[in-house]
Amino acid sequence: MKKFVLFLTGIFAFGAININTATMKELHTLSGIGHKKALAIIKYREKHKFEKIEDIMKVKGIGKKLFEKIKDEIEVK
């Protein structure tokens, strides 16, 4: 009988963070997201719903480089 080993990173074991509903604490767990950027995400979504994960680049301070870093850690529902 063959044995298969499955390695899971924290993101896959616990699921991606929904940027439309994430708390400040949850946003802080994202790579490169500190207090200032987490606050900017929360303020942005007060007026605009994230329709796709790429929309996070509309938030001031989050560009393509940071998006590439966090894209596998986030989702929208």
Image (spheres, rainbow, N blue to C red):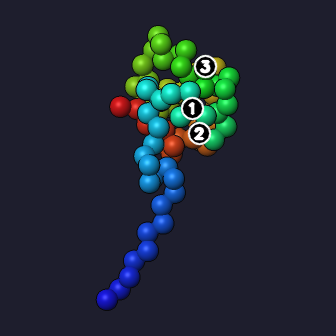
Distance between the alpha carbons at the discs numbered 2 and 3: 15 Å
Q: Nearer the viewer, mark 2 or mark 3?
A: 2
- Res. 8 mark: none
Decide: marks 1, 2 in contact (CB < 8 A)? yes
Label 1 element class: helix
**Residue 59 at x, y percent in the picture:** 58, 21
Circle 2: is it few (<14), some (14-19), or many (20+) Cα within 10 Å? Answer: few
Tell me which corner region of the image, top left, top right, bottom left or bottom right, holds residue 2.
bottom left
Above or below, 26 relative to 60 = below
Tell me the residue that label 1 is attached to.
Answer: 25
Distance between the alpha carbons at the discs numbered 1 and 2: 7 Å
Label 3 element class: helix
**Residue 64 at x, y percent in the picture:** 62, 34
Q: Nearer the viewer, mark 1 or mark 3?
A: 1
Decide: marks 1, 3 in contact (CB < 8 A)? no
- Res. 40 mark: 3
Circle 3: is it few (<14), some (14-19), or many (20+) Cα within 10 Å? Answer: some
Q: Nearer the viewer, residue 69 or 1?
A: 1
Picture residue at 60% right of the left edge, 19% below the top: 40
Picture residue at 38% right of the left edge, 82% below the top: 3
Which amino acid lies under the numbered mark 3 shown in the image of this protein?
A: Ala
Circle 1: is it few (<14), some (14-19), or many (20+) Cα within 10 Å? Answer: few
- Res. 29 mark: 2
Position of the N terminus, as image quadrant, is bottom left
Above or below, 60 relative to 6 = above
Which amino acid lies under the numbered mark 2 shown in the image of this protein?
A: Thr
Mark 1 or mark 3, which has the lower sequence index?
A: 1
Which amino acid lies under the numbered mark 1 shown in the image of this protein?
A: Lys
Q: Nearer the viewer, residue 40 or 59?
A: 40
Distance between the alpha carbons at the discs numbered 1 and 3: 14 Å
Left or right of residue 11: residue 63: right
Residue most extreme to the front: 25
